[in-house]
Image: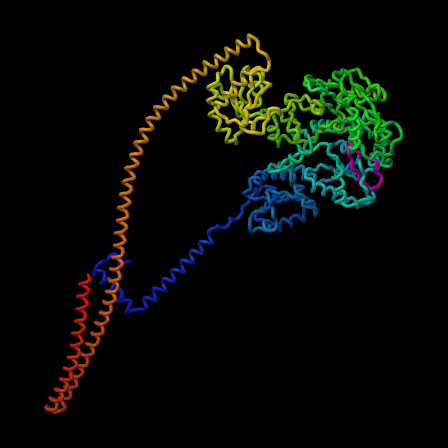
Amino acid sequence: MSLCGDSGPAGAPRLRPRAAQMARRPELLCGAAILLGCAFLVALKVTCSRAKDVTMPAKLPVNFFSTRSPVIDLFRGQLDYADHLRQDSEIVLYFFYAPWCGQSIAAREEIEHVASRLSDQVLFVAVNCWWNQGKCRKQKHFFYFPVIHLYHRSFGPIEYKGPMSAVYIEKFVRRVMTPLLYISSRSKLLDFLSNYEPGVLGYFEFNASPQPPGYLTFFTSALHSLKKDYLGTIRFGVITDKHVAEEISLVHSGSVYLHRHVNTSLIYPNDIMNYTAENICKWALENREMLIRWLRPHGGKSLLLNNELKKGPALLIFIPYNPLAEIHPLLDEITKVALEYHNCNKSQAAEPDLQHLGDTNSPAFDSSVPDAHTKLSETFSITKSPCCNTVVLPQWHSISRTHNVCELCINQTLGVKPNKVHVPHCNFFEIEAALDSFYLQEHTFFQVISSTIECSNFLSFYSPFSYYTACCRTVNRHFLSFISSEKTIFQTPKVTFSSHRKKDDAQHSIPHIEDRNCFIPDLHSSGTNFTGLSCRTNKTLNLYLLDSNLFWIYAERLGASRSTHVKEFAAIVDLKEEVHYVLDQNQSLVGSTLENFIKNFSILYSPLKRHLVDDPSVHLHDQRVITEVTTNTFHQTVFLSEKNVLLLYYAQWCGFCASLNHIFIQLARLLPPDNFIVARIDITRNDLPWEFMTDHLPTILFFPYGRKEQSVKFPEDFSVNLPNLLKFILHHSSSSSEPCTKECLHKETVLQQGHISHLEKEIEKLRSEITALHQAHDQLEAQLSEARREEHRLQQQKHTLEKQHKTLQLHSKQLQATYNQKNQELLAMAEKLQELADASENLLKENTLLRILVASREGKLQRQDEIKEPLQSEQTLSEDNSEVSTVTATLEEKRVDNIDTTETEHSSGSRTE
């Protein structure tokens, strides 16, 4: 690179000493090569070591719990030491956490609170399962944190999947500590059976041995139940008194009894299934009776609510719940409502106080009589528990607004009946056959207007012991909204029968489900109409409970108030019909309120008002050109306003809807505000009645004044622009389906004149705007022409610069070629100079040798002079001189030749330069 700056002979002397040094000491080249290789290896090693150290090693873990905490914190993941600690404790709780996990940090305080209360009975161990050097990380593979495992001696792990709240965790730990409730008296048995949760009771005689046969198996089955169902919905109890066990017909030690409030209670079939813990748990879970269920969403993505709501209409009840409280008055009242709702057979077993246990001879719990419940149900009248279905007949004429509503029931005569009824519920095939027979005779039930309930009986086609009863009445749809749950469509004292049908008494006829107390004399007590309603309606509800302390956000999304102090709320959600109803929060959440709420939902024409979700972020502003409509303001703005309304349906994600905003703003400014309202509604954030819903966006509806029910939809095949919208509005606002009077014509003329004057003013404004636009257009044309001229001038300058650029590039190439040529010549000259330097050095060596030779000759001649005679010495000297002169002459000739060659080359090099 040092040669690049020298273009003349001055650069040659710099190369000469370096070239001479390299030629004299070739070991320098080897040393330089070795140094370069070592430097390369060092650089490569440093680079590799830096690449390995890009990821910093994990810091050593620190204590997650305080050193004063009752929780043993194994922050290095010593899972083997945790197993060692578990061997010496009866109940152990493992808390697997990750130090960075927010849920783990939030649950730490809850675990410490539980440990402070139960540390004397339970060993609490926290294990860091995230540190990569710990055994927990290597052996356990969790998909989420934190994870809680409980061990009862050698049984486990029992994973807790409930809310990370101290009260819930403590409740679950106590259930693991005492999975069995010991029942030693009749009062404890009553308390156990009156609970709404399903209960499993085992009878064991502890007098024979400390641990009777089968007791450990039953104890383990209770732990299996907690392992499979973390909600702990099944309660296990042990009866130790023989007389108490006889209350529920348990006489043999080791018998297991599953208590159910509504359906028949069961005894574990030892002759069919093996007596193992897994089988007992499986049998209890499969046959349990779930009248009311707790829902506890874990907060992440889950299909829990979706799966439950798909089962049918659901009543969601939000109540504040403390699992550790001894009494729950509100929960007991809700449980009573659930029992009454599902008590289809009206058996005394469904009463929560279980007063029938006062009679120990009651056949309801006598295991020796397998059909005791069947016989008990047979004591009631046949008309109390029929299998019914509500049928709505079509309109008898297209102009009629009435319907005939019939209650079709399947009855059995008092003749020969089977000894045992295995399926107490309605049979689908019987209902289908009854409907077929009914529709064959439906012409007899058509009435234009009938104020009486007409009941008819006709025999079944398939069974001689069954007949069908149909009670019908005409209903006018205009009065359906005024029907309450206490006064239904069948409430009338007059009952008649068809003359061509089988005649029965009035008490054998089956009215509508909401008004049976008017026809059955012994059912006049309060609340009887609600008993067993789930089996007498086509809209059976599933009852669910949620803790409002944890899941109040779900209540708010359903319509609960955010500012309420009492977090009690109830709502019915019907996913199939896409509706939900909300219980008025001004009413207290008590049993009677829930019963009325359920009854109003269950009747055929429900008086409940559908709850619509409103957009709380919309605030009304008087200065807006376009009115923003919400669910609450829809009826007021559209139907109650004395103006023509143009409504736009839009959504935030609809891009084409947003492109119409400027058109609607211009339209709102054109139309007179005294007669027209231009509004819009976001259908994604507001619910509307089903008759006004749409599946196409954008949708434009026009509601003309005086004929709001005759709303008109803007045609989809027309482009949405200002002229088309004006034509659409003027066409439908002026049309009328009724003949107009003189006063109407006068008002219409005045209105049209007002429209014309308003449009003329707008046209004048548009003309002035057009004139201004023309002027702006001329100015813009002048500016464009000036810009075009400037562009042409710039194009010419561009072409000139491009030509100069090409010339410079060509000159640069020529200079580069010249530079390369001179560089090559300079390198050749350096090589020749190096050769001359080598030749000069050789000549210097030869000259030195000659001088040494001459000196040696002179010494020899002096010694010979001393020995030989003068004559001889003269001859010898003359001969030597002649030889020396000859050698000297030869050397001089060679030197002269070399000097001439050098001068010749130097002169030629000078000429080249």
Q: Where is residue 16 in the image (x, y as percent from the top left)?
A: 24, 65
* Left or right: 233 in relation to 882: right
* Colouring of the image: rainbow
Residue 295 in view of the camera? yes
* Residue 24 placement, left or right of 470: left
- Where residue 508 sits, quadrant-wise, is top right
- Front residue of 794 and 742: 742
Position of residue 94 relative to residue 705, above or below, is: below
Q: Does the magenta stretch include residue 263?
A: yes
Q: Quadrant of residue 464?
A: top right
Q: Where is residue 191 in the image (x, y as percent from the top left)?
A: 76, 32
Above-or-below relation of 213 to 28: above
Task: Give the quadrant of residue 198.
Answer: top right
Q: Judge from the rendering whether residue 361 lies leftward or rightward of residue 620; answer left or right.
A: right
Q: Nearer the viewer, residue 623 or 289?
A: 623
Which of 85 and 702 lies nearest the eye of the viewer?
Answer: 702
- Does any portion of residue 564 appear in the rendered image? no
Q: Main secondary structure of the magenta part?
A: loop
The magenta stretch spans residue 780: no
Return the residue found at the far right.
Answer: 416
Residue at 85%, 22% in the rendered image: 502
For the C terminus, which image quadrant? Answer: bottom left
Residue at 50% over, 12% down? 751
Q: Write the start and end of the magenta stretch as one range.
A: 248-264
Residue 768: horizontal and vertical position, in percent?
38, 19
72 relative position to 516: left or right: left
Which residue is found at the position 68% from the left and 37% from the top?
231
Q: Find residue 450 and report its horizontal and vertical position in percent.
A: 76, 16
Task: Determine whether 244 is above or below 690 in the image.
Answer: below
Q: In which quarter of the image is the N terminus?
A: bottom left
